[in-house]
Image (cartoon, helix red, strand yellow):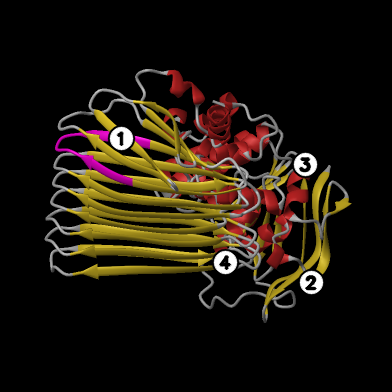
Amino acid sequence: MQDYEYMLRAYEQAGGETSIFKDSRIAHLVVHKNKVIGKHLVPGLFLEPEETPSGVDIRLRVEEGRKIEHPVHLCFGILPKEGVQIINIKARIEDGAQIRLLAHCVFPNAIKVVHQMEAEIELGDNALYEYNEVHFHGDEGGIEVVPRAKVKVGKNSSFQTNFSLLKGRVGVFDLDYEVRVDENSSLAMMTKIYGYGDDRIKIREAGWLEGKSSRGLIKSRIAVKDKAISEIVNELTASAPEARGHVDCLEVIQGMAQAKAVPIVNVNHELAQVTHEAAIGRVDKKQIQTLMARGLKEEEAIDLIISGMLK
Amino acid sequence: MEILRVEKVSLRLGDREILKELSFSVEAGTIHSLLGPNAAGKSSIAYCLLGCCDYLPQSGRIFFDGQDITTLPVYERARRGITLAWQEPARFEGLTVKDYIAVGMKNKDVTEIERVLYQVLLEPKNYLNRVIDKTLSGGERKRIELAAVMAMKPRLAILDEPDSGIDILALDSIVGIIKGLKEEGTTVLLITHREEVAEIADRTSLICSGFVVKEGSPQEVGRYFKEKCIPCPSRIYPSPENNI
């Protein structure tokens, strides 16, 4: 019970609204280390967590035609300074079903923590899956976050992810998502991370636009300072007529930080098109001076510009 | 009473001499226009007065309210009441119009932000939550820039070509905004290359090749500009020894 209260407190610190855990209309799942400490379902949603020695295996299914009205709240975390949490998710969103997930991952005291997530996600036709993940880490940077996902999107469907890690140290972050998209469907993946100290950020997001008129957008916004290092690989392949994609990576560096962006664009059909833009550099001098002309100090101006970029 | 005095300011960028012992002064509560052709050094004067890091003069002094501000950083000058509306305002990903305008305001009152947006003929409900990025046109960003300056209630507003990129129909509204700034007690240093815009000022300085060629009433200087500068076929800029 005490763990549950502490988790909710950490969830709140991460920006979550704890009142949702008392709302019967809203489904939720709370996992501390390898223990399921809170769970509530709504009709049409099947969520079966199974505790394992190092984490939890989760089967998630939204039954055909069912639109889950309110976002489903997930809270994963480890409260002690040390620990391992491996979450394996198998998700199936059936034809015509819709779900929005809001995951808060909280590791406020991490000194030697590993959080690993392996997801296999399958969307049927005319389905929607939206996944928003917010991380809250402590100031020590002693955490390793390794999310992996393989996603298959059916026809006329939409897959969206928004990942943000803006509070506390990143530690080591190594994300790898692969998404295959069928006819008339879309994928949109957005990542926002602020790294500092000696944080290490590695991201690979890859999409395959395999169906006619499929759409893809991969967008990254990364800010690194001190001795943090980031490497972003955004990969989009279009191999069907009228498939359209765009890759957009913006990284801002300060101090001794290092950033690398690798946009990979493949087009295998003459009627497909993928565009990309990537920029790495310090914060634009004109933006800084514009805000200084309104009375902000240079550091205040930089903070405002970066927080806008990561908003 | 004099609010700004520029004394023999020289500025060199690389091997180019941009400003050459430039001197002029501005009376408090007036509109003072700096008129001149392209590449005369007008924007460089604006950046110099604001204190932009690449535009610190090699010699000369700048006085604001009798205080030497030549070496003060931009934010210190802003806190004393000097600001600039940029000729090409910056874009800010993720920053809304409301947040941007509020930056320079002491009291971040939304009704005041709405008021200044109305003043620049932008409907607040359509703009408050818009992001200042590439989805806004150049003209919209210029109006937002002017609104941000108005909201700051500066003592000296340097307006760098507020009329550029604005269609002729909108010019009247820009002129109205500039006059409105003066009515609210702000001294305006208006930089322009159009003599019809410079004419709204109380006094005009004609700038060419980095120094003041002529000073006087806007009408007098405007006539001089029209007769001597516009037809100038050689584009040979004058020097202090060889005036036009």
Could you give the CA–CA distance between mark 2 and mark 1, rounded to whole angstroms? 72 Å
Q: Are marks 2 and 3 on the same chain?
A: yes
The local secondary structure at tag 3 comes to: loop
Q: Nearer the viewer, mark 4 or mark 3?
A: 3
Figure label count: 4
Q: A67 and A56: which one is in front?
A: A56
Label 4 belongs to which residue? B229
Rendered image: mark on residue B28:
3
Mark 2 or mark 3: whose residue is earlier in sequence: 3
Going by the numbered disc 1, the residue's amino acid type is Glu
Distance (Cα) linking label 2 and label 3? 27 Å
* Chain ID, mark 4: B
Please tell me which residue is depicted at 80% across the width and 46% down the height of the picture: B3
- Disc 1: which residue: A48
| Residue B58: numbered disc | 2
A19 vs B209: above or below? above
Q: Quadrant of residue B224?
A: bottom right
Which callout, 4 or 1, points to the residue nearer the camera? 1
